[in-house]
Image: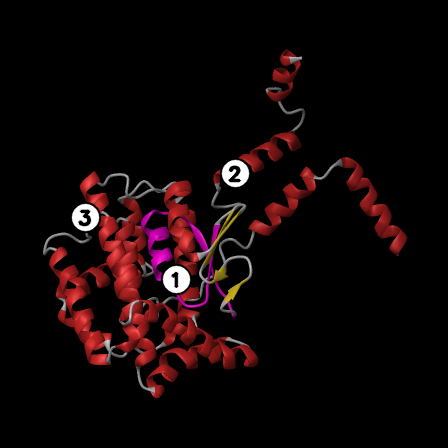
Amino acid sequence: MGLKWWNKANSKPENKKETKKQAFQTEVSIGNPKLCPVTLTQFQPAWKEQAYLRFSGIPYKLINSKFYGCHASGFYPQLFDGHFVLPKDEIMPHLIDKRVDIDKELTKTQLFESKAIKALVEEVLDPLLLALKWSSKDHIVKETVVRPMKKVLPNLFSMISPSLDEYRSMKICKVRNLNQLTIEQLLEKADEYYGALEIRLDDNSEFLFGGNPSSVDAVLFGHLANALVDFHLITLLPKFLFLTRFFNNIVDQYFSDSPPLIIISQKSFEDKEAYVASIAFANHINQLNAFNQIEASRICTEAAPVKDPFAKKRAFEDEFHEMAMPTEQKDVEPKEKNKNR
C-alpha cells in the first residue's frame, strides 16, 4: 500500500497538458509575478506598502478603488496575494514573512531600534497627523479631505464618508487625549518627535541603517508622504534637513520612471523585467489617485500613461483553468450550451 502511494505521488505526468498544469500550480503557489502578481488596492495612496514592495523588488499590480474599503478586509489598503486577502495592518508582516525579508541583514540591536522607531511613527506621529488634519479650519479640511473624496466616491458615499472618517480618526485621537490639544500644542509635540528622528538620521547614510532600505524606512517614508500634504506640517517639516533629504532620496530612487533601472542593476531582484513594468504602471495609477492631486503632493505627478503589464494574466489563467477542468465537465458544458440554443 505504501509503495503504491509513493509511486503515485512521484509518477511523471502522462502528457504535456499535465506538465503545464503542474507547473502552473507550482508557480502560483510560490507567487510567480507573471501569472499571479501581488495586487495592492488603495483608496488613498498606500505609500508605506508601496515603498516596501519597491524596496524588496516585488512586482505588483496597483488598483485605485472608488470605495473606502470592503467587507473582506475593512478599510483600504488591501493586499491580494494568491489565496491571501490581507487588511492594511497585516500587509507588511505578510510580505516580510512570506515574500522578501529586507530586514534579515540587520543586527539584533538594529532590529530592536527599528521596532522603537516604528512605534514612534505609528503610535505617536500618525495619530498626531490625524489630529492636525481634523482640527484644522473647515476650508482646509474640505480642500485636503472632502474634495478628493467627492471626486472619487459616488454621491451618497461622498456625503457620508468624510463624517465617518472624522469620527474614526478622532476616536483614535481621543484615546491619546490629542482631541483636547490646540493646533499650537499639537505642532509643539510634532516638532519634538520629528527632532528626535532628525538626530537619528546622520549626515552620511541614505537610510536609517546605512545604505540599504529596511522596513522601518518604508514606515517613515509612508508617514512623511502623508505629513507633507498636511496644511500645518508642510511648513514645519522643511526645517528638518535630514528628514527632507531622506524623503526626497526615496522619491528620486524608487518613485520615478527612470531611476528604478539604476536601482535594480545594483540588486538581485528575481524578475527585473516584471518589476520595471509594474513600477511604471503603478506610478501612472498613483498619478490618477485623487488624493495625490493635492497641490502639495509631488509623488509620481509626471508619470506617463502606461498599459497594464499584467493584462495577459487573465488569458493564462483561463487556459490553465480549462486544463484543470475534468474531462467529464468539458463534455457536459458544450451539450448544455447547445440545449440552451
Question: Can residue 51 be found in the magenta stretch?
Answer: yes
User: Residue 312, percent across and down?
Assistant: 56, 51
User: Residue 311, percent across and down?
Assistant: 55, 55
Residue drawn at the location 39% of the way across and 78% of the way down: 145
Label 3 sits on what residue type?
Phe
Residue drawn at the location 23% of the way across and 49% of the way down: 114
Please identify the quarter of the rendering in which residue 200 is found: bottom left
Q: Is residue 168 visible?
A: yes
Camera-side residue: 188 or 76? 188
Please identify the quarter of the rendering in which residue 268 is found: top left
Question: Can residue 33 be found in the magenta stretch?
Answer: no
How many circles with numbers are drawn on the protein? 3
Q: Which mark is residue 29?
A: 2
Residue drawn at the location 81% of the way across and 46% of the way down: 333
Is label 3 in a helix, a strand or a loop?
Answer: loop
User: Which residue is labeled 1 in the image?
Assistant: 46
Label 1 sits on what residue type?
Ala
- Which range of residues does the magenta coloring cover? 38-66
Q: Which mark is residue 209?
A: 3
User: Residue 299, percent across and down?
Assistant: 32, 67
